[in-house]
Image: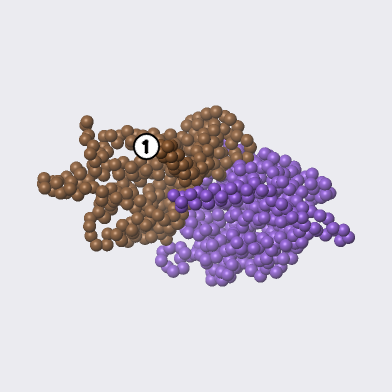
Amino acid sequence: MNTVRKFLGFFMVAVILVGCAQATPTTEPVTTAPATDGSTTTEHEAVTLSFLRPGLGEDAQKETDAQFAPFHEKYPWITIDTTIALPPELATKLQTSIAGGLPPDVVMAIGIGDAIKYENSGQLLDLTPYAEAEGFDWKNYYDPDALAYFNPNGKLQCVAETSDTRVLAYNKDMFDAAGLAYPTDDWTWNDLVTAAQALTKDTNSDGQIDQWGFATQTWDDQPWIWAAGASLYNQDYSEILITDPVVKKTYQFLADLRFKYNVWPPNEVLATFPEVGFMFAQGQLAMYPARWLPDTIFFFAGIPINWDVAMFPKNPDTGLRAASKGGGCIGVFAATPHPEEAYLWWRWITSDEGVYARSVGSNGIPALPGGPASSWPLLTAAFDTVKTPANAKAFIEMQPYTRFSDLPIDNAAEVYAAISPFMDEFWLGTKSIDELAPEIKAAVDPLLK
Amino acid sequence: MKRTKLSRMARREEIEGWLLISPWLIGICIFLVVPMILSIYVSFTKYDYVSPPEFIGLDNYVRALTADPKFWISLKITFLFTLMSLPLNFLLSFGVALLLNFRGAGLKIFRTIFYLPSILPPVAVSILWLWIFNPKYGMLNQIIGWFGIKGPGWLFDPKWALFALVVMSMWGFGQGMIVYLAGLQNINTEYYDAAKVDGAGPFRIFTKITIPLMSPVIFFNIVMGIIGSFQVFAQAFIMTGGGPVNSTLFYMLYLYQNSFKFYKAGYASALGWLLFVIIAFFSLLVVRSSSAWVYYEGDIKGR
């Protein structure tokens, strides 16, 4: 019985201590910061901001801390408490924290669908008054396309975190072995098919293809349609245009890559790799549309393949080329108890200095900026230092042909889920686009506004 | 005086008892009872986690039952899975339990080996089976290939994907097996001895003694199996995402999609309560039928 009493006593004391710890308000130390002119000092109450951003574990945390050093020098009274989440978990984590009434102060990588929902519901702080108060000409500072995409209501609420694109990555050794010339900027889809056919091989004569000519992610279909001069959705995203003959012809071309020219591996082969880029990195794929940061840093780090990139080929009929970009935006949540400090932090990470700091960061590899145009020259110069791929500037040259592909509507996930089963049949080759297009339209249009 | 002291002690013990179980009680109230009550309310609302819930009456339930084809697709898939996996798992776990019930060398090792897979985390198991099922590089099709048969596309083929998950579900048969084994070892050997003396053969002993005396355990496993198979989620979430062509869109996966991908918390709650009713109905059906086929030691049927 004594043991039980001791346990209960300990338990009660523990409960009281925990309760007291939570009930006692934390006293925030006061930090003195030098004033801008250096003559006087300004006192600021120390503020801690919660910041949610995407990343991969502890290394990302260390890198993040290093990236923020210039901000801390400028605003020493503001501490950034960073939470790093894997990109797929970030949205759920954010959603849960909002439902619980405790969203982070500032969030990076808010997906477009969520951003629109949070803007419309007032969850994201309207930063326009803060910008105007400091005379910040934000409309001319940020990339106008990205600004319009993430802020359809015209207020300043969310700014693109990065800008990416896709270029054609190719394995130089495979091209050399096949006696083919490397891709050039004037390549068309026809050149792509011809080369892919020559590069698709059964290298060990076991009756199975083990070197494929070309592959892409099946969901990244829109750039092909854009290059054909069409669009998968109408301008206000109220209708899917999949029954458009040009769109159908483009899908037929993609189906031909897999089923007619036999250069694009089937799903069961692709599924053995986490991403198409891994297949390329393992020397089983000759060409694919590569992204910049994830592919260069994660896939090819230390992998001894001889590769380079070129601009993505043009559609032979229209002479247009296109690529997609995704990524989210950076915003401040209206529930923040420190809106002024959150604005300062948001302002810095979306400024050319902040973009440069977090883009080049500690790994020395630049990212493509999503915010201010003024950061472009800095980052373009940083690209000069990139040794592999040799033609890394293709990522910058491809920018004018790059568009956001994620649907800027708040029920985008539902639309994708509605399309997915139909496209499964298409990519399996069990139904043609002519058969599927009306079915897709009937399923998707009611979901579009 | 003595009575008062005793009653005070009893009261103190009662209080201490309550205090000792209080962490569990508080936990179940906070993490189970309150969310359950809230989810009933949410199921009658339109709620996206961001805007305040908007009361819409029975709309979510009506929509699920009358206007959402995916509700019926996911229900059908879950039913099919239950119908296939439950008998197969019963046969395998009961059969292996019978084999392991024989006394012999190395039985403890075999029991451990058969039980081990069922305690592995579902994520690890799912990733392992992703490789086993790969049509091109997977072990399963390589083995089938030894007999000159071209294996199917498994998870990549809408006709085979659900069956592949049924096959995979048998991986966890060890859990049922261990319960059956415990039940078999609990049967008094005197029944078998008496039956042998009376001249009963192995088949008769099995059908007239083993099965009836095991019926409470079989009953328990069937009820748990129904509940478990209606709630299949992890395998489909990790391995197929509900595809291809919605062929593995289990009910729980569809519920999850509505809640955490489409942010339709009200509709997802309604789906959850509909599932509760479905599981309760089938569990009750089995419970009601149990009087006809479940025998408890000492029971005399027909009384």
Q: Which chain is brown?
A: B
Q: Quadrant of the C terminus of chain A?
A: top right
Badge 1: how crowded within 10 Å, few (<14), some, or many (20+)? some
Chain under label 1? B
Tint applied to chain A in the drawing = purple
Residue B92: percent from the left, percent from the top?
Answer: 30, 50
List the residue tagged with mark 1: B283
Numbered circles on residues, count: 1
Q: Residue at x 60, y 47 (%)?
A: A19
Image: A222 above or below A394 = above
**What residue appears at the point 38 percent right and 56 percent down from the top-left corner?**
B117
The answer to which image quadrant residue A375 occupies is: bottom right
Q: Residue at x 29, y 50 (%)?
A: B182
The residue lying toward the viewer, choosing from B155 and A312, is B155
What residue is rendered at 48% in x and 49% in y?
A5
Question: Residue pushed farthest front?
Answer: B1
Residue A147 shown left or right of residue B258 in the figure: right
| Residue A307 visible in rendering | yes
Image location (x, y in percent) of residue B111? 31, 57
Q: Residue furthest right?
A: A39
Colour treatment of the image: by chain
Front-lying residue, B228 or A439 = B228
For residue B74, side relative to residue B201 (left or right): right
| Nearer to me, A81 or A371 | A81
Amino acid type at image mark 1: Ser
Residue B156, horizontal then vertical, whole percent: 44, 51
Would you say residue B245 is visible in this rendering? no
User: Which one is nearer the viewer's eye here, A381 or A32?
Assistant: A32
* Residue B81 image position (x, y, % from top left): 38, 44
Judge from the rendering whether residue B125 lies leftward or rightward of residue B30; answer left or right: left
Q: Secondary structure at mark 1?
A: helix
